[in-house]
Image (cartoon, grey):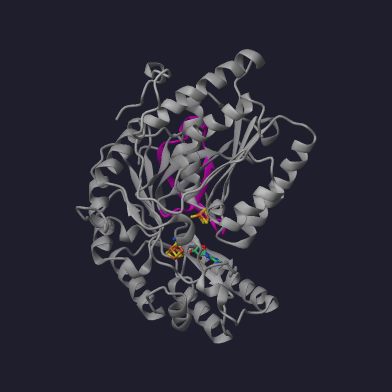
């Protein structure tokens, strides 16, 4: 479907029941507000969106940005100058929540000083009833609260909020859905980078790893139709996108619940055929579902980047079982071997948790051993955080804080050692690089990303941003390189 022209929408009629037409109706309605605002203030109202959490939230924020732009908002240069502030929240670890409360404290202060502001909260934290209760009692100034399942409804919620403001009323508008089967296609988005984009291929998670809150706040797994995904990517490529990142909590189980099931590898084969698309990435891959078919498709592909994010979480088979991960340390290592046999240059990255309830020194040493054997090019290391409602939160043997801290430091050292060894191996080689930005510290340099996800800085100019160029990696600086561009190679 092509973009709907808002001018053709008849606002004297009732809103249509069907999506996405219903939302375009409300976008047209809200646009009256931005037009009136502009007449009165000489500029359009500005929004500021702060995104916490993972790539899923980053992509959701692009959708929010798209809706607000169609409505006629402009993006504020800073939170201080915005008329409408949105926080897209994350709740995967306790400190994600704390950050949001910290920011709300500051907003409360601004509100108490009488500043005119609209405030909306959305995202994973809002799916927790205790959070919403707390917001209702302690942060009454918030205008709109919505969740992960109804981001598409922003214009409709904003319309209700504006209608209240017109009557000088303030009542929090709260719309949280517990779960949904609905996937609304063809809504606007506004991408952060013109040349690369995330594309959701599925939503939700069915894995219930025992420490993780994501399945509770993102609902059950549901896949988009392959033709909708392909159509979206084609449209993006037409707009200048060269690299897509296919997004899902576990992309390897993509397509299982579709009427006409298709594997993730099958989807990749279709994406590969899109002309003009140069690079394909995806995340996250759950080791338990990584198929031989996928390895084969990756190995034979010219477009799929030689990088796989394959979170291990722990190297202890005993803990992996309690974590409900459905693989052992040995199985994970075998998978790594298979991947390296098929693609010797592949970069592997991971997520690792330290201090899971009951983690012993032996368990932890298994993790260190695994890290050394895999040779990750980088890994996110997390201190276990207790999440209410997850099975692990009820486990008695929480590991003392000082022990966790000490293990965390040892793990970080091991990861860094492996990462710099991995990076060093590519020193002196010639690689294709997608130029992402002008270097913020030294504007005579640009920064680009290798297929394996590592960064290189080299002399260049703004006109090269978004282009694929060939670069020699001159000097390895641990986790990134300095290089120079080769022309005519
Ligand atoms: N679906 C992805 C990751 C989602 S969350 C996957 O399965 O890999 C990103 C990472 O946060 C997880 O991989 C895990 O390492 C970490 N994480 C999740 N819950 C956590 C918790 N309670 N404490 C600490 N880290 C956690
Ligand atoms: Fe959380 Fe596990 Fe689902 Fe990843 S696969 S989102 S870690 S429950
Ligand atoms: Fe956080 Fe939600 Fe992602 S909890 S990690 S933003 S899925």
Horizontal side, residue 74 vs residue 233: left or right: right
Residue 484: tell me if it is visible.
no
Camera-side residue: 117 or 48? 117
Name the residue located 58 percent from the left edge and 36 percent from the top edge: 444
For the C terminus, the quadrant is top left
Look at the picture and state if 188 lies above or below 205.
Answer: above
Task: Name the residue furthest right.
Answer: 113
Image spot of residue 53 (x, y percent): 55, 52
The segment highlighted magenta reads 452-479
Name the residue located 23 percent from the left edge and 43 percent from the top edge: 273
Image spot of residue 312 (x, y percent): 45, 70
Quadrant of the displayed image that contains ligand 2: bottom left
Horizontal side, residue 316 vs residue 96: left or right: left
Name the residue located 25 percent from the left edge and 53 percent from the top edge: 258
Image spot of residue 149 (x, y percent): 44, 48
Q: Quadrant of residue 19?
A: top left
Name the residue located 38 percent from the left edge and 20 percent from the top edge: 5
For the N terminus, the quadrant is top left
């Amino acid at each position: 479907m092509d973009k709907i022209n808002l001018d053709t929408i008849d606002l004297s009629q009732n809103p249509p029941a069907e999506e996405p037409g219903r939302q375009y109706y409300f976008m047209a309605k809200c646009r009256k507000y931005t037009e009136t605002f502009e007449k009165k203030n000489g500029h359009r109202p500005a929004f500021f969106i702060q995104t916490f959490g993972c790539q899923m939230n980053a992509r959701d924020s692009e959708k929010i940005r798209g809706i607000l732009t169609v409505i006629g908002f402009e993006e504020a240069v800073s939170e201080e100058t915005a008329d409408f502030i949105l926080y897209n929240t994350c709740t995967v670890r306790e400190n994600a929540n704390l950050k949001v409360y910290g920011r709300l404290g500051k907003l409360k202060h601004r509100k108490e000083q009488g500043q005119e502001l609209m405030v909306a909260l959305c995202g994973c934290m809002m799916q927790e009833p205790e959070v919403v209760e707390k917001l209702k009692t302690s942060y009454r100034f918030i205008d709109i609260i919505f969740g992960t399942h109804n981001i598409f409804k922003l214009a409709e919620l904003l319309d209700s909020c504006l209608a209240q403001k017109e009557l000088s009323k303030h009542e929090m508008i709260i719309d949280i859905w517990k779960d949904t089967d609905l996937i609304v296609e063809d809504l606007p988005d506004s991408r952060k980078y013109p040349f690369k984009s995330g594309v959701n291929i599925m939503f939700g998670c069915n894995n219930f790893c025992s420490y993780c809150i994501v399945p509770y706040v993102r609902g059950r797994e549901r896949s988009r139709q392959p033709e909708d995904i392909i159509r979206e990517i084609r449209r993006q490529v037409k707009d200048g996108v060269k690299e897509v990142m296919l997004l899902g909590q576990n992309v390897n189980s993509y397509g299982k619940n579709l009427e006409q099931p298709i594997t993730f590898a099958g989807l990749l084969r279709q994406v590969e055929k899109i002309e003009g698309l140069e690079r394909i990435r995806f995340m996250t891959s759950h080791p338990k579902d990584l198929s031989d078919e996928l390895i084969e498709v990756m190995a034979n592909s010219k477009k799929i980047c030689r990088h796989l994010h394959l979170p291990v979480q722990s190297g202890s088979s005993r803990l992996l079982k309690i974590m409900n991960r459905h693989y052992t340390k040995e199985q994970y290592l075998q998978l790594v071997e298979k991947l390296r046999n098929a693609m010797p240059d592949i970069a592997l990255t991971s997520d690792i948790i330290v201090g899971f309830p009951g983690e012993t020194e032996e368990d932890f040493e298994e993790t260190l051993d695994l890290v050394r054997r895999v040779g990750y090019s980088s890994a996110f290391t997390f201190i276990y955080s207790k999440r209410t409602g997850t099975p692990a939160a009820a486990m008695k043997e929480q590991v003392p804080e000082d022990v966790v801290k000490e293990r965390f430091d040892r793990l970080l050292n091991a990861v860094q050692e492996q990462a710099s060894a991995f990076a060093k191996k590519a020193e002196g080689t010639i690689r294709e690089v997608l130029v992402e930005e002008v270097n913020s510290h030294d504007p005579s340099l640009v920064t680009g990303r290798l297929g394996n996800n590592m960064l290189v800085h080299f002399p260049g100019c703004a006109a090269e941003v978004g282009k694929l160029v060939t670069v020699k990696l001159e000097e390895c600086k641990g986790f990134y390189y300095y290089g120079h561009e080769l022309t005519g190679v």
